[in-house]
Image (cartoon, grey):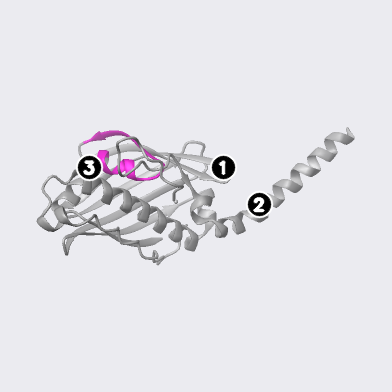
Amino acid sequence: MQLEHRFTVPVPPDVAWAALLDPERVTPCFPGATLQSVDGQEFTGTVKVRLGPISLLYKGKGAFADTDEQARRTVIQAAGKDSRGNGTASANVAVQVSEEGAGTAVELITDLTVTGRPAQLGRGLIADVSGKIVAKFADCLAKRLAGSDTNPGPEAASAPVPAVEPAPPAKPISAAGPAASAERAAPGDPAGSAPSEINLIEVAGVPVLKRLLPLLLSLVVVLFVVRRLTRRR
């Protein structure tokens, strides 16, 4: 599945580019993510995902590849596996940073492959959820960068921080087949902190509930039958 997203941040391209190449700066803005180690261009970490009563913990690693400093372009290659064997996820994310007005535009093209339970949500729903994740990530990153930019231009000094442009709907292109609850503000951190897990139901809402309803009803029926059989014994 290929997904396309675009967002803007109110800082110069050099500031945004440096931040996006630093896992320690961007990881706190990604819902459910925890950075474990960084070694040169490689890094390891975990991502927590919740799908109703099912909790998944993806452990994996990633690396920056094909980085072009002059063009401000790089490719992030990442792959992870659920600790309980419920599925895998891998992604190649092409990142392009360019100047736009007084700020910076960031374009992401992601080749995503998901297996296991999350893949059952379907291509369209995964695309919708990923768009909402990117929007929250962009909002958090914009606030953090705006607060850390030590050399803003005269326009930035006098104007309020502009709102982050919402990510457009993702464009699923090929078949294959993970989104955030409300941010919790951390003391002294104007950008807040990303949620400790990606809650797919909270992000996707009704569409996910519609998909899960048959499964939940089946579980209720099974539990009812088991209970009746137990009582008879």
- When the figure is inspected, residue 29 is found, relative to residue 232, above or below; the finding is below
- When the figure is inspected, residue 209 is found, relative to residue 64, above or below; the finding is below
User: Disc 2 residue type?
Assistant: Leu
User: Disc 1 residue type?
Assistant: Ile
Callout 1: SS: strand
Q: Circles 1 and 3: CB distance less than 8 Å?
A: no
Q: Residue 36 location, x and y as percent?
A: 33, 33
Check the picture and name the quadrant holding the N terminus: bottom left
Q: Residues within 10 Å of mark 3 (few under 14, many from 20)?
A: few
Q: Nearer the viewer, residue 116 or 132?
A: 132
> According to the image, label 3 marks what residue?
22
* Residue 161 visible, this angle: yes
In the image, which residues are magenta? 24-39
Q: Is residue 87 left or right of residue 64?
A: right
> According to the image, label 2 marks what residue?
215
Q: Is residue 107 left or right of residue 167?
A: left
Q: Residue 56 location, x and y as percent?
A: 50, 40
Q: Residue 105 location, x and y as percent?
A: 22, 60
Q: Quadrant of residue 68?
A: bottom left
Q: Residues within 10 Å of mark 1 (few under 14, many from 20)?
A: few
Mark 1 to mark 2 CA distance (whole Å): 12 Å
Q: Nearer the viewer, residue 104 or 44?
A: 104
- When the figure is inspected, residue 10 is found, relative to residue 174, above or below; the finding is above
Mark 3 to mark 2 CA distance (whole Å): 41 Å
Mark 1 to mark 3 CA distance (whole Å): 31 Å
Magenta stretch contains residue 36: yes
Q: Quadrant of residue 6?
A: bottom left
Q: Which mark is residue 54?
A: 1
Callout 2: SS: helix
Q: Residue at x 57, y 46 (%)?
A: 52
Q: Is residue 172 left or right of residue 38?
A: right
